[in-house]
Amino acid sequence: MGKIKILDDHTRSKISAGEVVERPASVVKELVENSIDAGSSEVLIEIKKAGKNYIRVVDNGQGMDEEDLVMAIRRYATSKIQNFEDIFRIKTLGFRGEALSAIASVSEIKISSRTKQDEIGNYVKLEAGIIKDKGKIPMPYGTEVIVRNLFFNTPARRKFLKTDSTEYNHILDMVIKFGLAFPEVEFQFISGAKNVLNLKKASFQQRIEQLFPELKNKLIPVEVQTPLFNLLGFLSSPKVNYPRRIKQYIFVNRRAVITPLIYSVIDKVYQGLITGRAYPAVFLFLDINPQFIDVNVHPTKREVKFKNEHELYELLLNILKGELSGEKIITTINPPSAPLMSDERKIYGSEISTQAVELTAHEIKEIQESFLEARREEFLIYKNKYTIWIDEEGINIVDNHAAWERVLFEKIKKVIDHGKVEIQRLLLPEVINLNPKSAEILRQNVDLFLKLGFEIKEFGENSFVVHTRPQFLNVSVVKLIEEVIADIIAEEKVEDKTYKIITSLACHSAVKAGDSLATEEIKNLISEVKKLNTPYCPHGRPALIKIRWQDVEKEFRRR
Ligand SMILES: Nc1ncnc2c1ncn2[C@@H]1O[C@H](COP(=O)(O)OP(=O)(O)OP(=O)(O)O)[C@@H](O)[C@H]1O
Ligand SMILES: [Mg+2]
């Protein structure tokens, strides 16, 4: 009895400050958001000691007069909304009216501000949320906020701060996000004595290149307008990728957001274009009618909720998939230009292989014969592994297995998408005997196999009979199904089982590297490869590599 008590004001504000102000980077975020909401075209961010002791943000925005300045530091004081419904019409980054009061309650803060109309500015100083001093101050128009000794009055929180380098990285990341989202604003970022960033006014693409020069000329731009959203995006070719999601930036109405929904769209778009666990560089700027999103779902607003999640997912997936196909993603070889004269024994930094000189007479004859063949057939086959041909654009090298895999993959996918498959009844139905685990996997997927043209019936314990196979997969049925099931078991955690099954079917039915193909089959392969939109095997290895004549000319110094 009597155990429950209402907390006093002071404790309450310290607790809720914790939600908004987690670390120095949150202070930077809130202050820069305010500067942008104030219509600034220049923002200076200065920190010392990773922001733990000193953060200063100066802007040239609309500023505040004396009365507003005192209001600004009060809790729930905002000029940005008037009622709850306004959140669904919001155009500003802030709206809760709590950031400044939250920061003030856990630091020593000085805010100085001057409007264009006033001749002199005003300042106010607070410690732990209590006003200690205020007065007039001459200054240019705009606002300057200095935050010292963050969490000085909440030692437990201060202790939780990470090392300087971690906290610094969080701030840098924050500044980069603002830089990307607001290329029309100039940002200067100073840390200690170091001028870290000096971003001039730019277009979205130029801003990306200012921040990540290594991505210059490596991004595919996308710009579309749909009834649900307008999108400006920049996608890297699959060749450019990173071990973590470090170069994926998503903005919704200029707000940097973490959104599993859109990450999963990106992963799906690049599925089969990148080998293993790797993440491409992707910058997406989505403009969505505020009615269709809820920005008020996270204390620091880093998540948003979409009203039409499903539609958004499908639409975005289709757009990005369409962009990431054909010519734009063909793997090209551009050898690094290096002065070759200096050391004749070196080619692009590696020794000329002595093996190349020591070809056996037999091998030389083989190569010569392939060239003769090439002249007749207009293609050349190397070790039954690669098919090479030339056209007006350059030299094409196809990995037979990878290419065939992709061709089959597309065919199987079509069967699944359109539900039409020509089947062949097996003269003698074939029996598959499986262990209990494999049997269970097959049982779970008989419908999918049926869709693909394999009619499989269970008979007896863990045994199955295959009655039909699809016409276009002319391979040993039992072995194929066993291999597919083994693949599924090996990667039990995969979410997209259908994709896995299609990939596995394509892989095990495709010609293997080293299989000899008849001339007609090769011709067929080349014509199929030419039709491919995604010349990659479904595991993400390239199926076609192109050496463009223009690069050849450059290398021979003819251009
Ligand atoms: N740099 C600035 N320039 C001009 N006005 C400012 C600036 N910073 C704050 N203000 C004024 O102070 C008010 C309070 O700022 P505060 O950040 O606490 O709340 P908010 O931005 O309205 O909402 P949120 O808590 O979501 O950030 C703002 O609504 C704005 O009117
Ligand atoms: Mg704010």
Image (cartoon, rainbow, N blue to C red):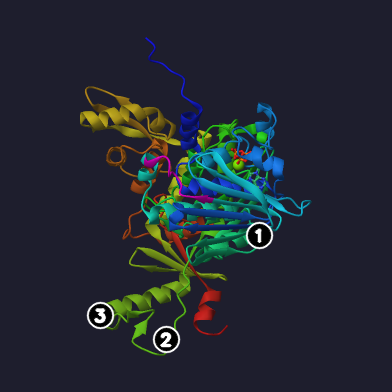
Label 1 C-beta lies within 8 Å of the nearest ligand 1 atom: no
Q: Quadrant of residue 474?
A: top left
User: Callout 3: helix, strand or loop?
Assistant: loop
Q: Which quadrant of the figure contains the C terminus? A: bottom right
- Image vertical order of residue 502 relative to residue 113, above or below: above
Whether residue 421 is visible to the viewer of this picture, yes or no, is no
Three-letter code, disc 3: Thr
Circle nearer the N terminus (3, 1): 1
Label 3 C-beta lies within 8 Å of the nearest ligand 1 atom: no
Residues at marks 3 and 2, CA–CA distance in whole angstroms: 28 Å
The circle drawn on residue 442 is none
x, y percent for residue 148 = 49, 50
**Residue depicted at 54% across the width and 47% down the height:** 109
Q: Left or right: where does residue 492 sit relative to residue 52? A: left
Residues at marks 2 and 1, CA–CA distance in whole angstroms: 38 Å
User: Callout 2: helix, strand or loop?
Assistant: loop
Q: What stretch is highlighted in magenta?
A: 147-155
Circle nearer the N terminus (3, 2): 2
Three-letter code, disc 2: Leu
Q: In which quarter of the image is ligand 1?
A: top right
Q: Left or right: where does residue 432 sit relative to residue 229? A: left
The circle drawn on residue 340 is 2
Three-letter code, disc 1: Ser
Whether residue 393 is visible to the viewer of this picture, yes or no, is yes
Residue 153 forms part of the magenta stretch? yes
Q: Foreground residue, 531 or 422?
A: 531
Circle nearer the N terminus (2, 1): 1
Judging by the rendered image, the residue that carries numbered circle 1 is 203
Q: Do the residues labelled 3 and 1 touch (CB within 8 Å)?
A: no
